[in-house]
Amino acid sequence: MSVVILGGIDRLKPYYLKQGRNLGFTEIKVFSKKFPDMVKRLSKFERIVICTGNVAHTMVEGTVRMAQIHGIQIGRTHSSSVSAMKKCLEKISN
């Protein structure tokens, strides 16, 4: 199962990756900033987690629209803490 994490804190990226691997996600990517062809690249993932406290509004809008079109499950958390990320990943892993 693959997951992409939008937002979060750069220095916590290794912890996000570790939590994802512990929950059985095989491919995990973390993007804290907007990047070229974002919507097209995100459509290849099975799950998406959005840290709404650390992401630009336009980034969230485009991602949600794309996820609805492709039937991708989205999890949201306002906090960027490792424990909040773990809870959100657990919720979408089922």
Image (cartoon, grey):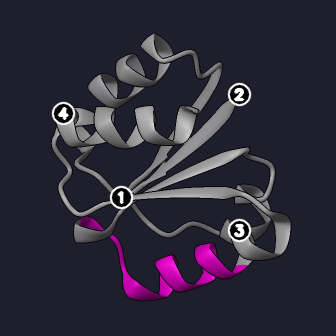
Secondary structure beneath disc 1? loop
Among numbered discs 4 and 2, the one appearing first in the sequence: 2
Q: Amino acid at mark 3?
A: Ala
Q: CA distance from mark 2 to mark 1?
A: 20 Å
Q: CA distance from mark 1 to mark 4?
A: 15 Å
Q: Would you call the spot at circle 2 few (<14 residues within 10 Å), some (14-19), or many (20 or more)?
A: few
> Horizontal and vertical percent for residue 34?
49, 70
Task: Give the residue at mark 2.
Answer: 1
The answer to whether mark 1 and mark 4 are in CB contact below 8 A is: no
Secondary structure beneath disc 4? helix
Q: Would you call the spot at circle 3 few (<14 residues within 10 Å), some (14-19), or many (20 or more)?
A: many
The N terminus: image quadrant: top right
Secondary structure beneath disc 2? loop
Q: CA distance from mark 4 to mark 3?
A: 24 Å
Q: Amino acid at mark 4?
A: Ser
Q: How many marks?
A: 4
Picture quarter containing residue 12? top left
Task: Give the residue at mark 4.
Answer: 83
Q: Amino acid at mark 2?
A: Met
Among numbered discs 3 and 1, the one appearing first in the sequence: 1
Among numbered discs 4 and 3, the one appearing first in the sequence: 3
Nearer the observer: mark 1 or 4; the answer is: 4
Q: Which mark is residue 67?
A: 3
The answer to whether mark 3 and mark 1 are in CB contact below 8 A is: no
The magenta stretch is 54-65
Q: CA distance from mark 4 to mark 2?
A: 21 Å
Task: Give the residue at mark 1.
Answer: 7
The answer to whether mark 4 and mark 3 are in CB contact below 8 A is: no
Residue located at (36% from left, 58% from top): 7
